[in-house]
Image (cartoon, rainbow, N blue to C red):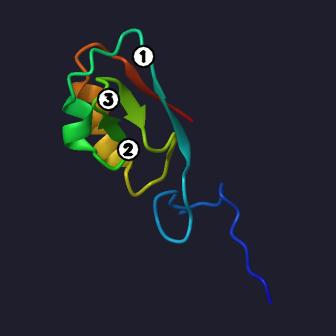
Amino acid sequence: MRISIHPLRKGFDLFSFPYKLIMKIRVDLVACASIGSCMQICPEVFEIRKDGYLYLLTDELDAALKDKVVKAVENCLNDAISIED
């Protein structure tokens, strides 16, 4: 027997197990100054390599890292990072 829950059903929580909310992370590499504040906040997603450029380790954001990535977006001095649904 298979039970499914409709996502718009009252009381449905997008951030609880077993559901994953996936959003996209975007970086404007022209605006990025490679300061590294995002990497310090969320090293699971952001990395500045020896060449001095920012790399995304993943471009899909799940609920487990959402709070850390939102904090990284808020702390980006050049507003180079954004999150899209």
Residue nearest the viewer, comparing 41 with 46: 46
Side (left or right) of 19 relative to 49: right
Secondary-structure class at tag 2: loop
* Residue at 25% in and 37% down: 39
* Residue at 38% in and 47% down: 66
Upstream in sequence: badge 1 or badge 2: 1
Tell me the distance, in whole angstroms, between the alpha carbons under discs 1 and 3.
14 Å
Q: Residues within 10 Å of mark 1 (few under 14, many from 20)?
A: few
The x, y position of residue 21, in whole percent, is 54, 52
Secondary-structure class at tag 1: loop
Task: Please report contact status of discs 3 and 2: CB closer than 8 Å, yes or no.
Answer: no
Residue type at tag 1: Leu
User: Disc 1 marks which residue?
Assistant: 29
User: Disc 2 marks which residue?
Assistant: 45
Upstream in sequence: badge 3 or badge 2: 2
The x, y position of residue 36, in whole percent, is 22, 29
Tell me the distance, in whole angstroms, between the alpha carbons under discs 3 and 2.
12 Å
Q: Which mark is residue 38?
A: none
Side (left or right) of 53 relative to 11: left
* Residue at 44% in and 54% down: 63
- Judge depth for marks 3 and 2 and give the one in front: 2
* Residue at 37% in and 52% down: 65
Residue nearest the viewer, comparing 51 with 70: 51
Can you name the residue that lies furthest to the top here? 30
User: Disc 3 marks which residue?
Assistant: 73
